[in-house]
């Protein structure tokens, strides 16, 4: 296989070409230390606070889109063929950018440390939705924290951007074709390899190249969105070399509906899957929007979340409840297995060296089935689950038919509650049946105590979520969602 030896991208108006690069060099360090672009701040160094937010423009399958990402956990090697926009690029000859001026006039900046990140997140939102609702603004800012608690003036500023300029006159909009042309000039199918001492970087351009390179280097670290791997470097100082970066693949982010299933490539991000979630799995819509912040959803991939095998990964519980299967690939060979059997023990998955998650097949719920997902965390938005739960139930006459119940945060792996399922299946569809099944939780789970929750709390929450599922879907009382809607009507 022939390789190129340079990572190339555009940074604001500068073309960057790098033939010497460490696999663990973050974009944040590159901006601040090498390019002296210090408006991008380092806050948490784990993709949580949003102070380091920059825009990354990617050209994929003829579509060009800017998205906010966390520079602190984005690796430079993942940015080949992109256009990176930092806060310094916004101020033009005419003065402040409309978003910056709105932040000034509506007092959206207090101590100022987080302000560049807020501006860049609002910029990404503004290019997608020039007239956003308050809900859309709040969703766009999930991944940005303000320790001065200045959210209300920031939201006011976001509502009033149009007073200071139109999207049609924005410089990134007017220069869109120029930037597309720049990135098209970088498109080719030749993979990239850079070696510097013992450090090795590979950037394949196709899934076939990925399979070949990974089979030849089965000890390599696969890096997709880096929302987990990034912390291995910034928090645990782990070596990730040799590393294979998946962000330049041009055939690994497709989704299709076929024979009642969603077939999802392993490289699909949370953000890219969201429109289909809203259309085909609306029961997952709220849950999906609580996975990280917008920056994390823009970066993180479904395949990566599964492959890392975290017991608190957000995607496995609902996918297990839906009966998802995985296609694993090594070289030219593939094999399939149920997702629930992929997780063997804490830190151990049924994945051989050189094997990667190629696709996830997710059966869509039957029209008459009941499907629900819940996430319990200390902070509502952009927080790690203490307990995640998913329920899928079909009714057989007046009894409980096929069902799958899956939890995250309750064991060393995402896990089905098989004893609870056995206590429910075939029984009358009553609350007494569900209450009687609660004792089976002690056979299924022995949760741990950690910084997020105590074991007894997790066990009680898991039981409560089962009862909540019954009450919302089969109880006589109005569902919580109905009550919430009524409350909103009264307030308005």
Image: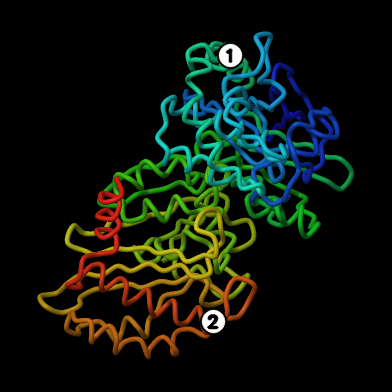
In the image, residue 462 sits, relative to residue 52, either above or below, namely below
- For mark 2, what is the residue? 447
Front disc: 1 or 2: 1
- For mark 1, what is the residue? 171
Q: Earlier in the sequence, mark 1 or mark 2?
A: 1
Res. 170 image quadrant: top right
Q: Are marks 1 and 2 in contact (CB under 8 Å)?
A: no
Question: In the structure shown, which secondary structural element does the residue marked by tag 2 occupy?
Answer: loop
Direction from residue 28 to residue 484 in the image, left or right? left
Q: Residues within 10 Å of mark 1 (few under 14, many from 20)?
A: few
Which residue corresponds to the image point at 53% horizontal and 17% vertical from the top-left? Answer: 164
Q: Residues within 10 Å of mark 2 (few under 14, many from 20)?
A: some
Question: In the structure shown, which secondary structural element does the residue marked by tag 1 occupy?
Answer: helix
In the picture, the disc for residue 472 is none
Which residue corresponds to the image point at 43% horizontal and 28% vertical from the top-left? Answer: 129
- Decide if residue 273 is in sight here: yes
x and y percentages locating residue 144 in the rendered image:
60, 44
Q: Quadrant of the N terminus?
A: top right
Picture colour scheme: rainbow
Q: Which is nearer the eye, 411 or 32?
A: 32
- Decide if residue 223 is in sight here: no
Res. 464 image quadrant: bottom left
Distance Cα–Cα, label 1 vs label 2 = 53 Å
Residue that lies at the very extreme toward the top in this rendered image: 93
x and y percentages locating residue 298 in the rendered image:
54, 41
Q: Which is nearer the eye, 93 or 254?
A: 93
x and y percentages locating residue 153 in the rendered image:
55, 37
Q: Quadrant of the C terminus?
A: top left
């Amino acid at each position: 296989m022939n390789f190129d030896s340079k990572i190339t991208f555009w940074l604001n108006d500068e073309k960057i070409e790098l033939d010497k690069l460490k696999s663990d060099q973050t974009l944040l360090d590159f901006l601040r230390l090498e390019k002296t672009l210090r408006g991008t701040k380092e806050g948490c160094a784990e993709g949580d606070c949003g102070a380091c937010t920059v825009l990354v423009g990617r050209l994929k399958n003829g579509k060009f889109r800017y998205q906010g990402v966390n520079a602190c956990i984005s690796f430079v090697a993942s940015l080949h063929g992109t256009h990176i926009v930092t806060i310094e690029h916004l101020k033009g000859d005419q003065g402040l950018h409309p978003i910056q001026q709105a932040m000034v006039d509506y007092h959206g900046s207090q101590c100022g440390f987080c302000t560049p990140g807020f501006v860049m997140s609002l910029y990404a939102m503004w290019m997608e939705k020039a007239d956003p609702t308050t809900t859309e603004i709040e969703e766009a800012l999930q991944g940005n924290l303000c320790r001065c608690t200045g959210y209300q003036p920031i939201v006011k500023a976001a509502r009033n951007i149009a007073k200071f300029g139109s999207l049609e006159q924005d410089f990134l909009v007017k220069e869109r074709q120029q930037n597309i042309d720049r990135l098209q000039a970088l498109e080719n199918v030749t993979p990239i390899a850079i070696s510097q001492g013992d450090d090795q970087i590979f950037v394949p351009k196709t899934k076939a190249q990925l399979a070949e390179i990974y089979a030849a280097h089965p000890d390599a670290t696969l890096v997709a969105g880096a929302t987990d791997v990034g912390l291995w470097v910034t928090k645990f100082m782990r070596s990730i070399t040799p590393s294979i970066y998946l962000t330049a693949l041009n055939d690994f982010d497709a989704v299709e509906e076929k024979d009642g299933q969603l077939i999802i490539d392993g490289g699909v991000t949370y953000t890219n899957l969201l429109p289909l979630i809203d259309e085909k799995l609306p029961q997952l819509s709220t849950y999906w929007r609580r996975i990280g912040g917008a920056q994390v959803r823009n970066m993180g991939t479904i395949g990566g979340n599964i492959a890392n095998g975290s017991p608190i990964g957000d995607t496995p519980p609902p996918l297990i409840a839906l009966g998802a299967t995985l296609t694993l690939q090594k070289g030219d060979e593939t094999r399939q297995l149920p997702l629930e059997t992929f997780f063997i023990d804490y830190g151990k998955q049924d994945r051989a060296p050189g094997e990667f998650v190629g696709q996830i097949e997710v059966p869509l719920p039957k029209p008459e089935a009941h499907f629900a997902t819940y996430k319990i965390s200390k902070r509502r938005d952009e927080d790690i689950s203490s307990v995640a739960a998913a329920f899928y139930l079909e009714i057989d006459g007046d009894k409980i038919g096929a069902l799958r119940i899956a939890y995250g945060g309750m064991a060393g792996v995402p896990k089905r509650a098989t004893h609870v399922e056995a206590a429910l299946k075939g029984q009358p569809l009553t609350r007494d049946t569900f209450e009687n099944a609660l004792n089976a939780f002690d056979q299924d789970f022995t949760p741990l105590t950690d910084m997020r929750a105590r074991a007894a709390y997790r066990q009680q929450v898991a039981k409560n979520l089962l009862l909540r599922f019954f009450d919302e879907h089969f109880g006589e009382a109005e569902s919580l969602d109905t009550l919430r809607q009524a409350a909103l009507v009264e307030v308005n």
